[in-house]
Image: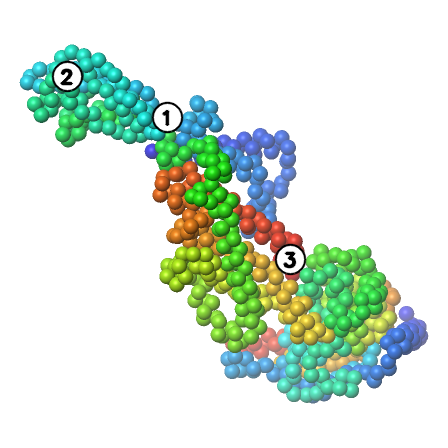
């Protein structure tokens, strides 16, 4: 139910902001017919990301996150209905030996992490006495209303109504602050209203994640600082990728230049390429243990095939007229290798490197989830075991940012180092 | 233009050509017995399905130094195969090729090639592309820079020296390709439809440039083209090839290349003989194409 509501809000923001930006903002600023270019399907260059849409999209995610976690960053009126907190009261009617008596139950509903004392209540008159209890938000609690009564359940007392509404075992009565269900054994079970917000255990509000971030930055996590965790992961990726490229690129060149190498390594490379590196984790752990070497070997294997295939296609993709031209300009075989084949294959190799870095980053996190002393993956795995959802979310965000950063860095390096990419 | 005037003009330009040739030889400091001789050249391609294609059959040709020869023919007549064999990229099935007194056994800097497109090194600047041949030979930097500078002046790309080749237009790129080929000072320049991918106006300018370079450098040039007009304009000698098997069908000796040097090519095209030759060759190629179509239809 809440899910549909979230989806509806999301679609609503999407549609409203679309009309607002395109019809109002853009109409006031630009007016041309370049948008017609999008009619030519497949012309990717004609469709550019709308900056407004990007900004609004990110803000919407935080808005919905804040709305459904009761974030302090948002004004109250934007919050989804909050779970009940405070003192709830209901009366029950007990029946024993043909007599009926009413008594009031006072329940203090408190935030989960608080310890509270049950409120003091006067016992009242009649054989049924007033009760009090405490229940944490989002939880339910059986209230043994008969325990202080003069006639208990064991003596034949039975709850027959809540707030005056008749109730039988297994039935539920709604009250202002939640609902009361009579259990199969006849004890009222009070469930304070949950509202539409997510419990912090499942999704903490943004500011709590931020507070936790600051805390983890200051104090570290499990004996290592945050930077050490991230640094270990990055170090493994860089070392694994470096060795993968160191072996994979010459291997790819050899496969692109020699029939024998091609025939020898083709079955191996073609077989290993579709095997997801994650599937190798168990074998790598058996062979090399859970230490640093195992992880680096895993990442080496993840990068190796990608780099070999990229280098191979870079070599075989050279336009034969370029080689012919170099020959008739008097270049020797080794000069053609150095001045034509290698530079011609660099764009392909860079594309491969970008893919390999992405795959390595994903693989290292997964490998650390399985077993590690430190690292980004280990951080979120351990945090999830201790239900530190805020650290899990913090870890996911950091992993995403670093993965994105790696890709951006590779693109930047590509622009600087192989500006001729795609210009042949 | 009267025939007498034409003869006169031709003599004058020939003298000029001889002079410039002398100059280039003096500059190089050597006098070589050059020329290209092709004898009984045959080329058969064996296809994977067991059949074979006779791309060239008994092609014989003698090319003197400084000749400008254009090769014309319908598709599949073996023009490009012939050029690739002369360049040394392909070994012929039978026949001999002798260049400057020695047999051709592979690609060499003495035979430069200009491709239709895509043969420039896009990871190098215009200057580096033009200087590629000299660099490979290990020429001293100063000398190389001088050659490159001179050639960039000749093809009019001095201002684009440090640009990447992919930033240039198609016509400019072909000028770079020409300059790169000339920088190596080859004896023969092989051109495989070098202007085929250019627009009409750029093409005309490039045709003038080719004529100018031919005159100024005195190089032997073999030029393959699909365009009858281009073949007439850029051929002292014009060879029409016939397909299946590829062979020389007819040879012409033409005055238009000499007339076109330094002149407006559109004026040359108005020459009465130009039109009649063009129509004759067009009809000839048309008949060959018809014959191929007929044969293919009969085969299916």
Q: Are marks 1 and 2 in contact (CB under 8 Å)?
A: no
For the residue pair A348 and B282, the one nearer the viewer reads as: A348
Q: Answer yes or no: are tags 2 and 3 on the same subunit.
A: yes
Q: Which residue is mark 1?
A: A82
Q: Quadrant of residue B149?
A: bottom right
Q: Choose the circle earlier in sequence order: 2 or 3.
A: 2
Q: Is residue A409 visible?
A: yes
- Label 3 sits on a secondary structure element that is loop
Q: Quadrant of residue B266?
A: bottom right
- Label 2 sits on a secondary structure element that is loop
Q: Choose the circle earlier in sequence order: 1 or 2.
A: 1
Measuring from the top left, give residue A348's x and y in whole percent. 58, 61
User: Relative to B196, is B291 above or below?
Assistant: below
Measuring from the top left, give residue B139's x and y in whole percent. 79, 71
Q: Which residue is mark 2?
A: A128
For the residue pair A308 and A139, the one nearer the viewer reads as: A139
Measuring from the top left, give residue B17's x and y in whole percent. 89, 74
> Residue A418, which numbered label?
3
Measuring from the top left, give residue A231's x and y in whole percent. 51, 49
Residue A79 left/right relative to A309: left
Q: Choose the circle earlier in sequence order: 1 or 3.
A: 1
Q: Quadrant of residue B221?
A: bottom right
């Amino acid at each position: 139910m809440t899910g549909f509501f979230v989806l509806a809000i999301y679609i609503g923001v999407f549609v409203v902001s679309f009309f607002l930006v395109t019809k109002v903002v853009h109409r006031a600023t630009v007016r041309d017919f370049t948008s017609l270019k999008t009619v030519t399907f497949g012309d990717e260059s004609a469709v550019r990301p709308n900056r407004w849409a990007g900004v609004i999209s990110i803000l919407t995610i935080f808005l919905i996150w804040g709305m459904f976690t009761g974030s302090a960053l948002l004004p109250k009126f934007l919050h989804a209905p909050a779970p009940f907190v405070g003192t709830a009261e209901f009366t029950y009617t007990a029946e024993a030996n043909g007599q009926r008596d009413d008594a009031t139950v006072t329940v203090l509903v408190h935030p989960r992490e608080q310890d509270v004392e049950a409120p003091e209540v006067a016992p009242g008159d009649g054989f049924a006495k007033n009760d009090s209890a405490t229940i944490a938000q989002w939880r339910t609690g059986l209230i043994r209303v008969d325990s202080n009564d003069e006639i208990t359940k064991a003596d034949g007392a039975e709850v027959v109504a809540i707030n005056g509404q008749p109730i039988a075992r297994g039935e539920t009565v709604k009250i202002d602050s939640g609902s009361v269900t009579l259990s199969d054994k006849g004890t009222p079970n009070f469930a304070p209203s949950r509202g539409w917000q997510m419990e912090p255990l499942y999704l903490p509000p943004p500011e709590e994640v931020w507070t936790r971030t600051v805390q983890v930055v200051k104090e570290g996590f499990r004996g290592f600082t945050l930077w050490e965790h991230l640094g270990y992961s990055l170090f493994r990726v860089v070392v694994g990728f470096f060795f993968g490229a160191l072996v994979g690129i010459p291997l790819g060149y050899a496969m692109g230049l020699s029939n024998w190498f091609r025939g020898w390594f083709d079955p191996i490379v073609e077989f290993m390429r579709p095997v997801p590196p994650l599937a190798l984790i168990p074998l790598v752990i058996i062979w090399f243990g859970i230490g640093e070497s195992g992880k680096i070997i895993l990442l080496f294997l993840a990068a190796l095939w990608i780099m070999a295939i990229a280098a191979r296609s870079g070599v075989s993709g050279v336009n034969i007229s370029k080689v012919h031209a170099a020959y008739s300009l008097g270049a020797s075989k080794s000069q053609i290798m150095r001045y034509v084949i290698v530079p011609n294959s660099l764009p392909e190799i860079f594309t491969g490197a970008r893919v390999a870095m992405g795959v390595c980053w994903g693989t290292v996190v997964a490998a650390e989830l399985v077993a590690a002393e430190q690292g980004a993956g280990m951080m979120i795995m351990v945090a999830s075991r201790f239900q530190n959802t805020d650290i899990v979310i913090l870890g996911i965000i950091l992993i995403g940012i670093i993965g994105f950063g790696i890709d951006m860095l590779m693109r930047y390096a590509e622009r600087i180092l192989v500006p001729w990419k795609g210009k042949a | 233009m009267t025939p007498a005037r034409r003869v006169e003009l031709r003599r004058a330009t020939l003298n000029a050509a001889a002079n410039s040739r002398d100059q280039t030889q003096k500059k190089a400091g050597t006098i070589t017995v050059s020329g290209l001789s092709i004898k009984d050249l045959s080329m058969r391609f064996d296809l994977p399905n067991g059949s074979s294609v006779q791309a060239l059959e008994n092609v014989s040709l003698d090319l003197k130094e400084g000749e400008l020869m254009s090769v014309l023919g319908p598709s599949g007549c073996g023009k490009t195969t012939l050029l690739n064999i002369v360049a040394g990229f392909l070994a012929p099935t039978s026949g001999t090729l002798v260049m400057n007194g020695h047999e051709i056994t592979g690609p060499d800097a003495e035979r430069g090639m200009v491709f239709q497109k895509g043969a420039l090194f896009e990871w190098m600047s215009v200057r580096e592309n033009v200087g590629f041949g000299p660099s490979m030979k290990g020429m001293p930097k100063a000398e190389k820079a001088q050659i490159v500078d001179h050639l960039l002046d000749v093809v009019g790309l001095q201002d684009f020296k440090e640009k990447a080749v992919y930033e240039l237009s198609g016509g400019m790129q072909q000028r770079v390709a020409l300059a790169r080929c000339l920088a190596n000072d080859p004896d023969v320049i092989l051109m495989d439809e070098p202007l085929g991918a250019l627009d009409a106006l750029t093409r005309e300018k490039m045709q003038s440039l080719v004529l100018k370079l031919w005159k100024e450098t005195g190089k032997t040039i073999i030029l393959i083209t699909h365009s009858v007009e281009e073949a007439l304009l850029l051929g002292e000698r014009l060879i029409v090839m016939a397909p299946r098997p590829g062979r020389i069908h007819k040879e012409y000796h033409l005055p238009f290349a000499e007339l076109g040097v330094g002149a407006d090519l559109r004026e040359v095209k108005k020459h009465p003989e130009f039109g009649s030759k063009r129509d004759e060759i067009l009809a000839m190629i048309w008949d060959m194409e018809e014959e191929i179509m007929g044969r293919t239809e009969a085969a299916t």
